[in-house]
Image (spheres, rainbow, N blue to C red):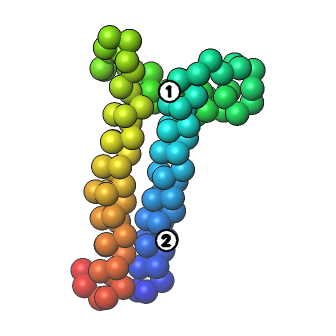
Amino acid sequence: MFVVANLVIGIGQALHYILNIYIFIVVARAIISWVNPDPYNPIVRFLYMATEPVLRYVRRVIPIVSGIDFSPIIVMVALFFLDQVLIQSIIDYGIRLKAGMP
C-alpha cells in the first residue's frame, strides 16, 4: 500500500511544481506586457502561446476595464486556489494512505 501512497504523493507534488511553473510563466507574460516586446523573439512567442488560450478565456468572461487587463491576476488566483485545494488534497490523501488510514 505504501507504493500506491508514494505514487499519489508523487503525482500531487509533480502537479504542484507544474502549477508553480505555469504561475511564473503568467507572471513573466504580465511583466513583458508592460513594455513593447519584440513579437518575433522566441521567448516572447513562447510566453504568448503558453498563456494566451487561458487568458483569452478569462478576458471573454471578465472584459478589460479602463484599459487594465485583470486576466493574469485572476488566472494566478485560480491557480493558487487549485494548488491549495486540489493538489494539497491529493498530497494529504497520499499521506493518509501511507499512514494506513482510509
Q: The disc labelled 2 sits on which kind of residue?
A: Gly
Q: Quadrant of the N terminus?
A: bottom left
Would you call the spot at circle 1 few (<14 residues within 10 Å), some (14-19), or many (20 or more)? few
Work out whether residue 86 can be spotted.
Answer: yes
Residue drawn at (41%, 79%) of the image: 5
> Left or right: where does residue 14 sit relative to residue 86?
right
User: Residue 27's x, y, as percent?
Assistant: 50, 38
* Camera-nearest residue between 58 and 76: 76
Residue drawn at (24%, 80%) of the image: 102
| Quarter of the rendering containing residue 35 | top right
Q: Is mark 1 in CB contact (under 8 Å) with mark 2?
A: no
Q: Answer above or below: position of 66 versus 98.
A: above
Q: Which mark, residue 53?
A: 1
- The mark that comes first in sequence, 1 or 2, is 2
Residue drawn at (29%, 88%) of the image: 100
* Real-space Cα separation, disc 1 to disc 2, in angstroms: 28 Å
| Quarter of the rendering containing residue 12 | bottom left
Q: Which mark, residue 10?
A: 2
